[in-house]
């Protein structure tokens, strides 16, 4: 036990500071990916609900494909594919040699594109719970598109989507561990580095797992607080 | 975009399909058995048993699969002398078995939640009727609760199967050459990530599509009482 604490200490021989920084990196890349996914999800859900036939079909294809392919492949695509594209661009510019995409950008984009497919499904499901009468009532009261969206649609969709969104956030968080393959020093990569230099892989992967668990647990608490908050004033809580 | 190259990598990637399917099947079946055990523990009358199963699910679902794989494959290597004396080193030395172990432990936690919901959905009346007929304990579970619960769980458990196919891609990181492993090698050899991605993605989509069909056929076969009822379209889309 003492030994474990020593490994975790914040002193010059300990890994505490490095692991803490890596945990922040994990959260940062997951949050960025999740937000990108939120924007993609909203647009794709809108395409599924209101788009013309080709828009609807491509939105459906997007969600089907991204949910059927391993996330790791998507990360490879964005990391290596992105680097190829950037290198090509720079070569056009006259700059020679290989230019890599920053792993953070590639990772956040990959998480965003995958979680966007899942978020689209959640938003779509939440929108369908909305009673048609409420939208009609809003229109009858003279609300324009934007006001209707802000006052009537968004708050209700948000409330119904929250539990599903919470699950997707947890997915994005756990997916961020895969970005370690691109060399981004997030929690798992940092644990790998520490394990390599101390030859204590068991301890460090255990610690990494424990930190992940703490983050998922904390976010679970935050989401259930948000759900309670969003559901206030509604009998029986979330319906 | 080079279609010839896509076709070429598609053919090369096909050689990884057996391993992906094998890993999926093994891990899925092991996971299913473990999931049943955990689900039964979750509905147990004993608080301690419930708590044990609950914490297992909480820990596994709260940590990334890749961390679990690394913990088993690299982490347990630290205890090599102990494992050797127990005769388990043969097993933990192989990425293959470590991968299957991690995948099934992980799948079991997610699967048990599906099964728990299904077990709790079995109506009290049917259990009471069975008890009135004199069934109890194992017979009650085998004849009444399990069949009803499994049928209830099937659609959701089908999703778990798809997730398992996707999850097997992670063992490529611990040197297993299944579809994603071969894809990563092709990318680093040819520097053509987009084409390789299209080829590998197509293979995964085909596998997942076929498995979805199999699950829905199984579902159709298991629910004869829902068939033959004339309905006007899919009730889910009736209000569109």
Image: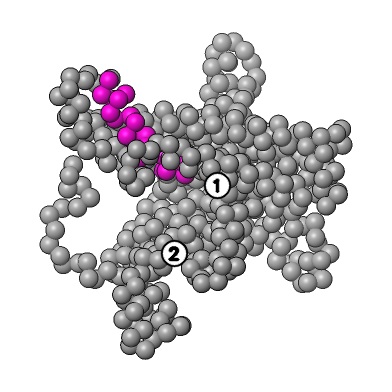
Locate residue A227: give its quadrant: top left
Locate residue B215: give its quadrant: bottom left
User: What secondary structure is marked by label 1?
Assistant: helix
Residue depicted at x 30% and y 70%? B222
Residue depicted at x 77% and y 50%? A203
Q: In the figure, is residue A186 to the left or right of B19?
A: right
Chain to which the residue tagged by mark 1 belongs: B
Residue situated in front as seen by the camera: A148 or B144? A148
How far across and how far down the image is residue B194, in percent?
Answer: 49, 34
Is A158 contained in the magenta span?
A: yes
Residue depicted at x 73% and y 42%? A191
For residue B36, above or below residue A177: below
How far across and how far down the image is residue A54, in percent?
Answer: 25, 32
Q: Residue at the far top: name it.
A: A94
- Range of the magenta residues? A147-168
Chain to which the residue tagged by mark 2 belongs: B
Q: Which residue is mark 1?
A: B180
Q: Which residue is mark 2?
A: B115
């Amino acid at each position: 036990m003492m030994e474990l604490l020593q490994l975790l200490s914040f002193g010059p021989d300990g890994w505490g500071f490095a692991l803490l920084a890596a945990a922040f990196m994990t959260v940062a890349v997951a949050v960025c990916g999740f937000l990108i996914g939120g924007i993609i999800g909203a647009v794709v859900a809108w395409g599924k609900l209101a788009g013309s036939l080709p828009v609807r079909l491509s939105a459906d294809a997007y969600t089907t494909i991204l949910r059927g392919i391993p996330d790791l492949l998507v990360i490879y695509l964005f990391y290596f594919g992105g680097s190829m594209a950037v290198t090509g661009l720079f070569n056009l510019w006259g700059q020679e040699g290989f230019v890599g995409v920053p792993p953070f950008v590639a990772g956040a984009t990959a998480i965003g594109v995958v979680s966007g497919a899942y978020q689209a499904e959640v938003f779509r499901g939440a929108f369908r719970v909305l009673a048609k009468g409420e939208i009609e009532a809003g229109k009858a009261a003279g609300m324009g598109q934007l006001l209707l969206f802000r006052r009537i649609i968004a708050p209700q969709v948000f409330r119904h989507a929250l539990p599903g969104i919470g699950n997707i956030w947890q997915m994005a968080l756990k997916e961020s561990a895969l970005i370690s393959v691109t060399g981004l020093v997030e929690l798992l990569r940092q644990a790998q580095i520490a394990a390599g230099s101390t030859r204590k892989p068991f301890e460090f992967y255990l610690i990494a797992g424990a930190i992940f668990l703490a983050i998922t647990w904390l976010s679970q608490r935050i989401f259930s607080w948000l759900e309670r908050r969003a559901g206030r004033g509604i009998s029986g809580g979330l319906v | 975009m080079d279609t010839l190259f896509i076709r070429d990598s598609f053919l090369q990637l096909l050689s990884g399909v057996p391993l992906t399917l094998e890993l999926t099947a093994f891990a899925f079946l092991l996971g299913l058995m473990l999931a049943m055990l955990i689900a039964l523990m979750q509905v147990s009358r004993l608080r301690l048993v419930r708590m044990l199963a609950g914490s297992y699910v909480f820990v596994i679902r709260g940590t990334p699969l890749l961390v679990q794989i690394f913990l088993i494959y690299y982490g347990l290597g630290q205890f090599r002398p102990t494992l050797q004396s127990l005769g388990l080193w043969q097993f933990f030395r192989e990425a293959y078995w470590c991968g299957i172990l991690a995948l099934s432990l992980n799948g079991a936690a997610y699967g048990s939640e599906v099964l728990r919901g299904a077990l709790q959905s079995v109506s009290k009346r049917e259990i009471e009727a069975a008890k009135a007929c004199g069934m109890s304990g194992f017979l009650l579970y085998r004849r009444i609760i399990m069949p009803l619960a499994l049928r209830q769980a099937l659609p959701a458990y089908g999703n778990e199967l798809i997730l398992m196919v996707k999850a097997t891609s992670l063992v490529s990181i611990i040197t297993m050459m299944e579809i994603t492993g071969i894809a990563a090698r092709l990318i680093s050899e040819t520097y053509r990530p987009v084409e390789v991605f299209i080829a590998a993605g197509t293979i995964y989509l085909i596998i997942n599509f076929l498995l979805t069909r199999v699950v829905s056929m199984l579902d159709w076969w298991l629910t004869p009482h829902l068939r033959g009822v004339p309905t006007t379209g899919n009730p889910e889309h009736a209000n569109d």
